[in-house]
Image (cartoon, rainbow, N blue to C red):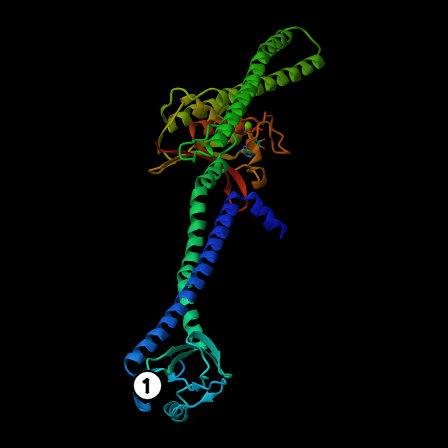
């Protein structure tokens, strides 16, 4: 119950729909009650008028002079017994208030007992309600020219039924229109809030790198200030992240000079005489310096692809890039006796910065060589359709477990238990380049059973 209340309180859309619906229902209810009672009055008035007209007509027709059969026929011909209108002469009232039956009248009362009512002669001229003991009647008493009193009567229950039915019929349009109106309100409110729903869906779909401003064009004026505030925030976040990346790039850059100096000193030291033990330590020192240099180079590459805008995009042949990368990496692959090469001779041209593509492929091939055991296989291939070009680097190493596939793209993340030297930045660089050139990266096993080997697919949309 509390949950529903909270949902209502938190949602402008639900609240607006509810308020409008309650308003419509209230207005319809008031209008319905008003229409009902005025229709009821109207129909009662109409039925009173009908009694008056019958009285007038009866007088004109000399009704009192007709025979019983004619009277019956003239008033009740073809009429349902329940809804009949009684027309009869009243017995003459005695001066003391008793009833003196006039011969003609008593004859009527006697012979048409079924078709006439036991009305007393004391009824006054005009419209009135009279209870016979069994039924209540609406009676109009009218004094004829002859001095006799003519009564025109109709059952109250029948009148009420007719009046109620007519009045209820006036409610029909409200009953039919109300649900339609409520549906329309719900629909209109939903369509008014549609831009907000699609805006949140759009923001939700963005990845953390997409900090470009939200477009205000299709949005209602009322939401624009809110979106403008979000855009300001996005801008500040982007500036902040830019500053962070520049700091990393600057730090990496600044570290390069002392590292180069260190490496130079280690080289000089290598040329001097020293004990075997000291040389062993020097060797370890040089390896450490080399690793630091590689990591620094990777860090600089990551900072560059993250901070600088894409420059000079042109059509680049994938086969050409594969050849270049393989030439560079061949010594590493040979050292592990890997069967490495390009599968198929299909080529494709992708619109990218050439250096970006080289760095991307080199990092993937470097990983494949590094993490595939000696004597393994590494295959590079390219496949294209009308809309997509997919570059694939596949190996038969251990692959990456499904649970690690998201995290390996994080900078400095390395899967536990791997004994290869590395910075944890390779796949972060691949991801950053893919994002900036608009490509998608997917990791899969190259063999499903047993699940092993890594297949990295980089997909470019054909432009
Ligand atoms: N081809 C591969 N086969 C198996 N594991 C891989 C492969 N490529 C990457 N990985 C795993 O993903 C992690 C992250 O890779 P990367 O970002 O290139 O960093 P690094 O190679 O420097 O460790 C690696 O530490 C490794 O565990
Ligand atoms: Mg790597």
Q: Determine whether 248 is above or below 182 in the image.
A: above
Residue 432 in view here: yes
Residue ranking furthest to the left: 61
Q: Which residue is mark 1?
A: 64
At a point 56% along the width and 26% down the height, the residue shown is: 425
Q: Determine whether 421 is above or below 59 in the image.
A: above
Q: Determine whether 138 is above or below 416 in the image.
A: below
Query: Horizontal and vertical percent for residue 116?
Result: 40, 87
At a point 44% along the width and 39% down the height, the residue shown is: 195
Q: Residues within 10 Å of mark 1 (few under 14, many from 20)?
A: many
For the residue pair 445 and 83, the one nearer the viewer reads as 83
Q: Quadrant of the C terminus?
A: top left
Q: Name the image quarter holding residue 403.
A: top right
For the residue pair 82 and 223, the one nearer the viewer reads as 82
**Figure quadrant, ligand 1:** top right
Q: Determine whether 218 is above or below 363 in the image.
A: below
Q: Name the image quarter holding residue 401.
A: top right
């Amino acid at each position: 119950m509390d949950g529903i209340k909270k949902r209502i309180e938190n949602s402008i859309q639900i609240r607006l729909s509810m308020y409008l619906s309650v308003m419509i229902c209230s207005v319809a209810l008031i209008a319905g009650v008003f229409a009902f009672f005025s229709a009821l009055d109207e129909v009662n008035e109409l039925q009173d008028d009908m009694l008056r007209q019958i009285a007038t007509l009866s007088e004109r027709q000399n009704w009192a002079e007709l025979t019983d059969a004619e009277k019956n026929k003239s008033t009740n011909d073809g009429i349902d017994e329940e809804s009949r209108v009684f027309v009869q002469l009243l017995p003459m009232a005695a001066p003391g208030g008793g009833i003196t039956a006039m011969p003609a009248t008593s004859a009527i009362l006697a012979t048409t007992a079924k078709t006439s009512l036991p009305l007393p002669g004391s009824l006054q001229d005009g419209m009135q309600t009279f209870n016979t003991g069994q039924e209540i009647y609406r009676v109009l008493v009218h004094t004829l020219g002859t001095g006799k009193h003519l009564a025109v009567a109709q059952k109250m229950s029948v009148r009420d039924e007719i009046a109620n039915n007519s009045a209820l019929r006036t409610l029909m349009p409200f009953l039919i229109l109300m649900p339609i109106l409520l549906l329309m309100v719900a629909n209109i409110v939903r369509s008014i809030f549609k831009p907000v729903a699609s805006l949140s869906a759009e923001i939700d779909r963005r990845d953390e790198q997409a900090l470009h401003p939200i477009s205000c064009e299709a949005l209602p004026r009322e939401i624009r200030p809110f979106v403008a505030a979000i855009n300001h925030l996005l801008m500040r976040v982007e500036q902040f992240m830019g500053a962070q990346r520049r700091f990393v790039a600057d730090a990496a850059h600044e570290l390069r000079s002392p590292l180069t100096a260190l490496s130079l000193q280690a080289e000089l030291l290598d040329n001097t005489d020293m004990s075997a033990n000291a040389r062993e330590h020097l060797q370890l020192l040089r390896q450490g310096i080399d690793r630091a240099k590689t990591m620094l180079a990777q860090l600089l590459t990551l900072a560059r692809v993250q901070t600088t805008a894409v420059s000079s995009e042109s059509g680049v042949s994938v086969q050409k890039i594969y050849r270049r990368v393989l030439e560079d990496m061949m010594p590493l692959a040979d050292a592990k006796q890997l069967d490495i090469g390009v599968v198929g001779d299909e080529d494709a041209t992708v619109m990218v910065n050439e250096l970006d593509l080289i760095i991307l492929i080199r990092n993937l091939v470097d990983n494949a060589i590094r993490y595939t055991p000696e004597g393994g296989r590494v295959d590079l291939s390219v496949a294209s359709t009308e809309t997509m070009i997919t570059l694939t680097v596949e190996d038969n190493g251990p692959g990456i477990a499904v649970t690690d596939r998201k995290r390996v793209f994080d900078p400095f993340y390395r899967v536990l238990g791997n004994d290869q030297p590395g910075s944890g930045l390779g796949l972060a660089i691949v991801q950053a380049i893919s994002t900036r050139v608009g490509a998608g990266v997917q990791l899969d096993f190259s063999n499903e059973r047993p699940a092993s080997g890594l297949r990295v697919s980089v997909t470019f949309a054909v432009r």
